[in-house]
Amino acid sequence: SSGINAEYGRSLPDSLLNKRLKNIIDTLTQNIYAYACTGLFEIHKLLFSFQMTIKILQAKNDLRPEDLDFFVKGNISLEKSARKKPHAWIPDQGWEDLVKFSEVASDEGDICGMVER
């Protein structure tokens, strides 16, 4: 309890309640991350950071489930795409993943077209 009260004082003060709450949440998030990392091996810190980031983005509704699904699994389709691989240096699975990603993240522009140029 006294630790949490101390964090209220460390977060940036603001006269607007919503901004003040955001500052407190940001400060507590940073402190929780730092404290949790003291008990983790180096090899586990990146995974913990990833998990925390995913949870924060999900809480803000800034992460579409299909984007996370693609990021974790990649292209799991057994069918080859109709689009031909433009360069020999691109691995076959890498090209298939890129084609699938361009379908999932259509709002990112024509990623395959950029690679083909």
Image (cartoon, grey):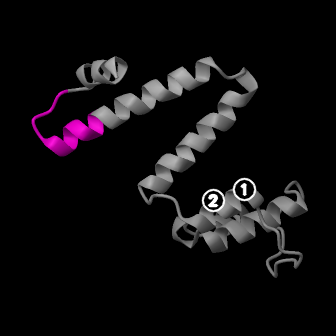
Asked if residue 29 is positioned above or below residue 6 in the image, the reply reads below
The disc labelled 2 sits on which kind of residue? Leu
Q: Which residues are magenta?
A: 13-23
Given residues 73 and 114, the one toward you in this image is: 73
Q: Which quadrant of the view contains residue 3?
A: top left
Residue at 44% in and 24% down: 31
How far across and how far down the image is residue 60, in percent?
41, 55
**Which mark, by number, is residue 68?**
2
Number of numbered discs: 2
Mark 2 neighbour class, 10 Å CA radius: few under 14, some 14 to 19, many 20 or more: few
Asked if residue 42 is positioned above or below residue 112 in the image, the reply reads above
- Outermost residue, bottom side: 82
Is residue 4 visible in this depiction of the protein?
Answer: yes
Q: Secondary structure at mark 1?
A: helix
Residue at 60% in and 35% down: 49
Residue at 61% in and 43% down: 51
**Which mark, by number, is residue 72?**
1
13 left or right of 102 in image: left
Q: Is residue 65 magenta?
A: no
Given residues 58 and 103, the one toward you in this image is: 58
The N terminus sits in image quarter: top left
Rounded to the nearest angstrom, the CA distance separating label 1 from label 2 is 6 Å
